[in-house]
Amino acid sequence: MTMTRESDTMKYRALLETKLAELLQAVRKREDITIEKAADALDDLQLAALRELAITNLNRESRLLRAVRGALARFKDGSYGVCLHCEEPISPKRLNAVPWAAYCVRCQEAVDRGEMIEERHDADDFDLMDAA
């Protein structure tokens, strides 16, 4: 590993650890998904819409948390920066944009098109109860 590559690796790890702390804090905030009742039907509808938005955000943050944890696990096993599908190096440009990327651009596009099933890994086994 070259000096530049090693400094990049340290940068990615620091970014991932910062993102992990941010996401752990975000998924712990679940008060927005409590079921509230209002006297007015329109207010009830608005509360339900806000609750759905909060649940959507929690789901997105939980998926991102799994991805960040997976990337940190790949640091531990030495596979960080290598596509989980084709095993080719993930470009530094992609890692700069998405440090938790598990796939190279080509394989991620195949996942997004539904041509390839996203692979699950031990680090993906995240339960929302862990966030409590």
Image (cartoon, grey):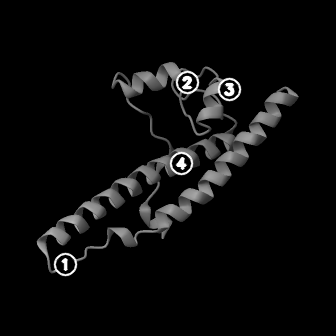
Which percent across, then down, holds residue 29? 46, 68
Instruction: Tell me the distance, in whole angstroms, between the alpha carbons under discs 2 and 3.
Output: 10 Å
Identify the element where label 2 is drawn.
Answer: loop
Query: Which dot marks residue 38?
Result: 1
Label 3 Cα crowd, 10 Å radius (few <14 / some 14-19 / many 20+): some
Which residue does the image show at 83% across and 29% down from the upper left? Answer: 4
Identify the secondary structure beneath mark 3.
Answer: helix
The disc placed on residue 128 is none
The CA distance from mark 2 to mark 1 is 48 Å
Q: Residues within 10 Å of mark 4 (few under 14, many from 20)?
A: some
* Disc 4 + disc 1, Cβ < 8 Å: no
Q: CA distance from mark 4 to mark 3?
A: 23 Å
Image x and y of residue 111, in percent? 40, 27
Q: Is 131 above or below relative to 98?
A: below
Please, is residue 36 above or below residue 126 in the view?
below
Instruction: For the residues labelled 4 and 2, say whether their Cβ atoms are less than 8 Å apart.
Output: no
Mark 4, mark 3: which one is toward the viewer?
A: 3
Question: What is the distance, in whole Å, between disc 4 and disc 1 at their CAs?
Answer: 41 Å
Q: Which residue type carries mark 3?
A: Pro
SS state under label 4: helix
The amino acid type, in three-letter code, at marker 1 is Ala
